[in-house]
Image: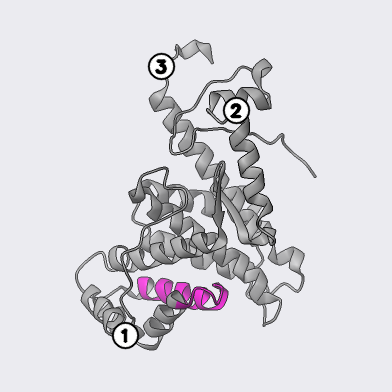
Amino acid sequence: GIQSIPSVKALKEDSYDVKKIKLGEVDVEHFSRELRFSNDSVEKTKKNESKHDNVHEIARVIPFRLHDVHDAWSDAALSFEFALKTGIHMSNGPLSPEEEKAFRDWLELLSKTLPIQMKRTHDIIHLLLKNFSIAVESQSNMDNLISQNIPLEPKRQWHTCTYGDNQMGYTCGLWQLFHIMSIGVVEYNQHNAAIPTRHASETLRNYVEHFFQCEVCRLNFLDMYDNCSFDGCHRLSAQPASTEHEWRELPLWLWETHNDVNVRLMGERMEQNSQVEPNSW
């Protein structure tokens, strides 16, 4: 059942600036005016949306800007490759046994759950799994494997939720990858021996523990996961479930977790930028 009232947060595109809004002022005209979003642009957006026949091909990642689902796939793939270059081998020498297992489990999970449209990513995953003992020895080994077997692509940039700063695209693209994986578990389980949702979440958790280089982000995620936030300990099953309803708990749980992370980050940013008196809240 419904346990809380949903919140709406509005920000100007390409900005983290938050505009304080009095409750009595919350209406469409006010939002349009404060965000400098004219009625003409609203109508233009509606016309653009009507051009898309398949609503499943549209992903709204930044408010008021349409992104094709291919943008999400592209950003996820770009973050996956960036992580291979910067987040796996963080010290000299081979990966530890724990890191090896976490990395292999992650690659095997992605190989089953990413859409076939992410062909380049699949090719890289297949290559790394086939030559796993070589890849885990050093960063240079992994780089050479990829450069010698995967065609070089033109320089790419992140498209979604960069807020005008391409450097912000990596973390966002990584979250895109996590979400795509979680939905892919549902898709995969419909046609194959089911992946237990707890196995997928544990695989994600262990990847974050060993390879997510944002220390604060890593510790916060692990704290949430290990303390069963959003009832993850009960919603995610260690047994291969048989119904789509049970499988969907994984992407739903991950969305709730990610939303909580965003709310926390937004609160921290608002606190840093706030100029109001302490008692005015």
Closer to the eye: label 2 or 3: 2
Q: Is residue 267 visible?
A: yes
Percent x, y of residue 16:
44, 34
Within 10 Å of disc 3 (Cα), the crowding (few <14, some 14-19, many 20+) is few
Q: From the image, which quarter does the N terminus lie in?
A: top right
At 30% from the left and 76% from the top, the residue drawn is 152
Q: Which mark is residue 275?
A: 3
Which amino acid type corresponds to the residue marked 1 in the rendered image? Asn
The residue pinned by badge 1 equals 149
At 38% from the left and 84% from the top, the residue drawn is 127
Percent x, y of residue 53:
69, 61
Give the main secondary structure of the magenta stretch: helix
Q: CA distance from mark 3 to mark 1?
A: 54 Å
Q: Which residue is more in the foreground, 172 or 28? A: 28
Image-quadrant location for residue 30: top right
The residue pinned by badge 2 equals 32
In the rendered view, does 89 fall on the left or right side of 272?
A: left
In the rendered view, does 161 fall on the left or right side of 236?
A: left
In the rendered structure, which disc, 3 or 1, sits on the residue that comes first in sequence? 1
Percent x, y of residue 178:
51, 61
In the rendered structure, which disc, 2 or 1, sits on the residue that comes first in sequence? 2
Residue that extends furthest to the bottom in the rendered view of this protein? 130
Image-quadrant location for residue 46: top right
At mark 3, the secondary structure is loop
The correct choice, above or below, for 242 with respect to 207 in the image is: below
Within 10 Å of disc 2 (Cα), the crowding (few <14, some 14-19, many 20+) is some
Q: CA distance from mark 2 to mark 3?
A: 24 Å
The region drawn magenta spans 99-119
